Image: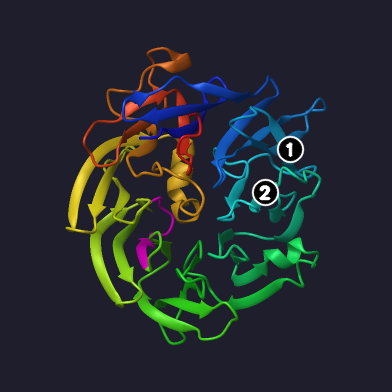
Amino acid sequence: MRATTLAYVADDGTLTLRPIDEHGVDEPVGIASGSDREQLVGPIWSPAGALAVSRTGRDAEKALTGEFQLHTTQQRSGRLLFRNPPNAPNVMAPGVAHYAAWSHDGRRVALVAPGAEQLQLYLLEPSLADPEVPPRPLLGGAPMFLAWSPDDRLLAIHRGNDLLLIDAAAVEAGAEPDEARQPLISDVPTYRAPGWTVDGASIIYAAPRAQAGNALWTVRRDGSDRSAIADLDDVTALSRAPARDLLALVTLSPAVAAGHDLRLLDLQAETIDPIEAGPVTAAFWAPDGSALYYFVPSSEDGEYALQRWRLADRSRQWLTRFRPSAHFMTLLSFYDQYAHSHHLLSPDGRWLTLGGIVPSNGAGGRLGFATQPGCYILPADGSGPPQRIAAAEIGFFSPVPGLLG
């Protein structure tokens, strides 16, 4: 079995790779480090196994700085892809300096960055063969959620009340962003990140019905054939299973960190399968779509339980409980967006990673035996307990196995 690779920023500020195989965890490999003025935030894997990280801090004049850099595991070197404009904040949320979503072929990056007054979306083309291609500004606004089409040509974007498409291939070929922009719907949004059907023919979103109530809708990529496919109670987070038109839906509760009523919607069979009626904060698919991993608040002091739902036999399995780190909590709070781009499960589905504190296992690192967040791995089938592998707030698996041999 080839090793899988976990990346995290350790508590000493080092961007670190950790190979993991059936024999256990191998020695860490440092890739990059921060400095007295700068810290590393991230990381973000590309589909080809390159590694991007944000570098934030202050310059010699104490002005805020933020950069987005690309590293390769072989060269151990970084290349600047993007620098925040002057007077922009250097973070958007705890542990989030930039949000990046790579196209499936790894050729393009949709980057959400803080601007001086609002969020800004850029198109990056990080080809190592042509490092001088500048970032292409696409649009600004907030909130900003997005998803690549399966053919990597189009970006579906939820900005404010608008659902629109941007033809990234046309922008790359020289078109102005407003020329490559296609408005689809302007309505009161009752969703966050949009989705795509497996064939890439339609975009999935949620909005009110004309008379009363909310619904889940599909609309063709040319703006035609807007169809309601299911009734919804409230604002809903949606995430599609890999290679299948099966949606995990969580009804979001206003002003709190947890939703409720986790259901599976089969778009082809038009059936809804309830999984969890109580509070649910986030849900992530196994890489092969065979299981759903979801997080349930288990106490009033911020502790969560991780559970696994197997589609084949409709069985529920309790895996562990933990208290998320601040960075991991940000991911859970916007899980439907991060599900497009960040991997909590290894590509073979064998391992799952958590960031925070597992009870009786939170010591070590720069604080010695004091309790502090750690990066954990655990068998995704529940066959073993979480193992703390680093003093870090969050980690992500590479989508490509065997990077470090």
Is residue 252 highlighted in magenta? yes
Q: Is residue 316 left or right of residue 174?
A: left
Q: Does the segment drawn in magenta span residue 83?
A: no
The residue segment tinted magenta is 246-257
**Percent coordinates x, y for residue 210 in the rendering:** 47, 86
Image quadrant in which the N terminus is located: top left
Residue 136 seen in the current view: yes
Residue 34 image position (x, y, % from top left): 65, 24
In the rendered structure, find residue 38 and report the number of the disc placed on it. Answer: none
Discs 1, 2 touching: Cβ within 8 Å: no
Image-quadrant location for residue 141: bottom right
Task: State the SS at label 2.
Answer: strand
Asked whether residue 394 is in view, the answer is: no
61 is higher (above) or lower (below) than 173: above
Between residue 279 and residue 347, name the one nearer to us.
347
What residue type is disc 2 on? Ala
Q: Is residue 404 left or right of residue 273?
A: right
- For the residue pair 206 and 149, the one nearer the viewer reads as 149
Q: Is residue 388 left or right of residue 84?
A: left
Structure colour scheme: rainbow
| Residue placed most toward the observer, 56 or 400 | 400
Q: Quadrant of residue 379?
A: top left
How many numbered marks have been drawn onto this rendered protein structure?
Answer: 2
Residue sitting at x 45%, y 15%: 367
Q: Which residue is tagged 2?
A: 113
| Residue 180, placed above or below residue 229 | above
Amino acid type, callout 1: Leu
